[in-house]
Amino acid sequence: MMPFRPARVAAALAMVLTALQPDTAVALGDTHIEPLWLRPASSSATGPIASNDTLAPLLLPSGWSLGDAAAVIVSDRPGMEEGHRRVVAALIEEGAAVLEIDWHMGRGRAPHAASTPQDLVPNLFGALLALRRDAGAGLMVALGYGAGGPAALLAAQEDVAVPHLGPAGPRFVAAAALGPGRPAFAAGAAPPAEEGWPTRAPLLCKALAGAAEAGRAEAERDCIAGLEGAAQREQEPRPAPLEFRQLGSRW
């Protein structure tokens, strides 16, 4: 786990709060924000803190605990647009943690420099590793906007994950490209049967589709069709959980 550096953490959180509060318009309720150190998964840096490490805001809903679900969101757009805000609110409402990552993370880019989806994949895997290692998240999904959308879909592919995470590392269970244009969805690694993913995947789709600006029924159908591969690979699912958040005993 990264060491605690009070001055650096305070400065980063101040910037995070300044960026989030005026723009999100999300009713956070009892949700609180914690800083999470991220390092691109392709980084060759070693040691507790490296020059390309960055702090990202992790939104934790009330009652979130070890093993609960989390979503990683990457966008190439400054701030949050309305659809993005609704997705964050829907995920928080479902009890999932939300980690917003900077698409320039670890690349030293100017604020408006272009990145390709392939450039962003190590950032998503770095977020995945930090969520599992330092926050104790269970099932995790990758969501993206703009160039972040294709990056999220790439991060769900096993042949893309292995070089960054190894054959036995954590995996995203699902991914979605949420705009612009028609959303696209992809199944990731099949989770263990005890996670009850066949029941929970449609609940994720309902939450994401409910945040769409238009075509919600179509988006929900596309999502279920896109994620059913991982659901079908899971064997002997346990009885249906009561909430999407539930993994093991929670999402």
Image: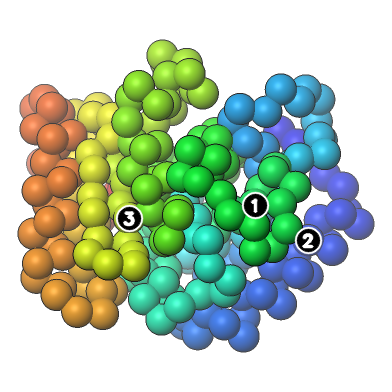
Looking at the rendered structure, the kind of residue marked 3 is Ala
Q: Where is residue 200 in the image (x, y as percent from the top left)?
A: 19, 49
Toward the top, the furthest residue is: 167
Residue topped by disc 3: 177
State whether residue 20 is above or below residue 34: below
Q: Which of 144 and 110 is in front in this view?
A: 110
For residue 38, which quarter of the picture?
Answer: top right
Q: Is mark 1 on a helix, strand or loop?
A: loop
Cα gap from disc 3 to disc 1, whole angstroms: 18 Å
State whether residue 19 is above or below residue 151: below
Looking at the rendered structure, the kind of residue marked 1 is His
Residue topped by disc 1: 104
Mark 3 or 2, which is nearer the eye? 3
Cα gap from disc 3 to disc 2, whole angstroms: 28 Å
Say which mark, if any, is on residue 12: 2
Sequence order check, earlier mark of 1 and 2: 2
How many neighbours does mark 3 have within 10 angstroms: few (below 14), some (14-19), or many (20 or more)?
many
For residue 110, which quarter of the picture?
Answer: bottom right
Q: Where is residue 153 in the image (x, y as percent from the top left)?
A: 33, 43
Query: Is the residue under label 2 in contact with that under label 1 (CB below 8 Å)?
Result: no
